[in-house]
Image (cartoon, rainbow, N blue to C red):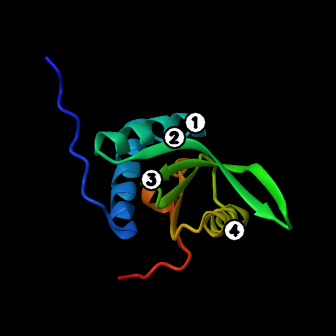
Amino acid sequence: MTLAKAQRPQSMTENELGREVIDAAIIVHRELGPGLLESVYEIILLDELCKRGLNAKRQVPISFECRGIHFDEAFRADIILEDKVILELKSVEALNNAHKKQLLTYLKLTEMKLGFLLNFGEVLMKNGIVRTVHGLSES
């Protein structure tokens, strides 16, 4: 017997994807709790998003060009969702401004409009979610 794959939603907006991200992150955090390695949360969150029928990839190499110099791998995005949303995962006691600036730089370099900084080190996941936008309409 073969299990049916989750139906892939029609093209979702960044904001709709954002709601899925928050819900999935809370579910993963409730299941695992804080204190594990970032890579564990990354793999389980990827699985949760894929089970929802979403196209999610992890450790995606991102290239860019600056001053005529091409960088094949300027950074690796922890998770890219539907080629629209970047997820940067942390498992630390507290986020700092450098983490937030890092995500904003990633958004600028990829020309994506929405990103989430998800800190699975928080006791409550809702306290570890930072939504970052770059040129995204709030509607």
Q: Which of the two discs, 3 and 4, labels the residue nearer the N terminus?
A: 3
Residue bearing the label numbered 4: 101
Which numbered mark, 1 or 3, is in the foreground of this view?
A: 3
Residue bearing the label numbered 1: 39
Q: What element carries label 3?
A: strand
Residue bearing the label numbered 2: 42
Q: Which of the two discs, 4 and 1, labels the residue nearer the N terminus?
A: 1
Asked if labels 1 and 4 touch by Cβ distance under 8 angstroms, the answer is no
Asked if labels 1 and 2 touch by Cβ distance under 8 angstroms, the answer is yes
Q: Which of the two discs, 1 and 3, labels the residue nearer the N terminus?
A: 1
Give the CA separation, mark 2 to mark 1.
5 Å
Amino acid identity at mark 1 = Ser
Q: How crowded is mark 1: few (under 14 residues within 10 Å), some or many (20 or more)?
A: some
Give the CA separation, mark 4 to mark 2.
20 Å
From the top left corner, tell me how far across and down residue 74 is, in percent. Answer: 75, 52
Amino acid identity at mark 3 = Leu
Asked if labels 3 and 2 touch by Cβ distance under 8 angstroms, the answer is no
| Above or below for 98 versus 55 | below
Q: Is mark 4 on a helix, strand or loop?
A: helix
